[in-house]
Amino acid sequence: MSQENENLEADQAEEVVEPQENEAEETVEVDPLEAAQVEAADWKDKFLRAHADFENSKRRLEKDKMNAVAYANESFAKDILAVIDSFENALASMQGSEESSEVLEKMQEGVNLTYEQLKKILEKNSIKEINCEGEFDPEVHQAIMQVESDAHEEGDVVQVMQKGYTIKERVLRPAMVSTCK
């Protein structure tokens, strides 16, 4: 029987499963029109994205240009603030003087008129004084010292050491203040 088993195994090994010729070969034919439409849609999408990026860049550059023009005078404005501080100090010292001579009154009037002109020029160029009343705001105030005060609540501005200014929406110089402990 062993010989019969060997013959049977040999017969089975010779039987190789061959693919049937009847099976249809799977080949997908691509319609050239559909392929062109897909490619056209892809290119249209790329174009629309590139165009949107271009428009966004254009708007961003326009905004940057407007800011550059609006804040071009910023360094000049910072320099002129020292002049306005000097005028304020001159007016304060003249008002505190005990002498009331006619010359001193004329000088005070001249300095006051010049000071008012300078303030109008600053306002015309969107440079405004920072309001220092009320609570301390770290965005526009710079605390120089803290003092005790019964008349103010904790965190309120007690005294203004140097006025602060803004140009349009940007802080040009923060107000130097003392706050209540």
Image: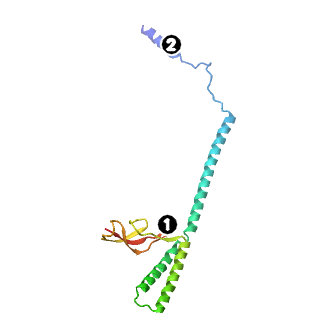
Q: Which mark is residue 154?
A: none
Q: Nearer the viewer, mark 1 or mark 2?
A: 1
Q: Circle 1 sits in a helix, a strand or a loop, which is it?
A: strand
Q: Quadrant of the C terminus?
A: bottom left
**Residue 121 position in % (x across, y down):** 55, 76
Quick check: 11 left or right of 97?
A: right
Measuring 48% from the left and 92% from the top, which residue is drawn there?
Answer: 103
Q: Residue furthest right?
A: 33
Quick check: 58 left or right of 84?
A: right
In the rendered image, which quarter is residue 162 located in?
bottom left
**Residue 161 position in % (x across, y down):** 39, 75
Measuring 58% from the left and 64% from the top, which residue is drawn there?
Answer: 66
Asked if the residue at tag 2 contacts the one at tag 1, i.e. Cβ–Cβ closer than 8 Å, the answer is no
* Amino acid beneath label 2: Asp
Measuring 42% from the left and 7% from the top, which residue is drawn there?
Answer: 1
**Structural crowding at the residue carrying mark 2, measured as other residues with C-alpha within 10 Å and reported as few (<14), some (14–19) or many (≥20):** few
**Residue 116 position in % (x across, y down):** 52, 79
Q: Which of marks 2 and 1 precedes in the sequence? A: 2
76 or 1: nearer the viewer = 76
**Residue 139 position in % (x across, y down):** 43, 65
* Amino acid beneath label 1: Arg
Write down the residue under mark 1.
170
Q: Circle 2 sits in a helix, a strand or a loop, which is it?
A: helix
Write down the residue under mark 2.
11
135 or 127: nearer the viewer = 135
51 in relation to 72, above or below: above
82 or 87: nearer the viewer = 87
18 in relation to 140, above or below: above
99 in relation to 139, above or below: below
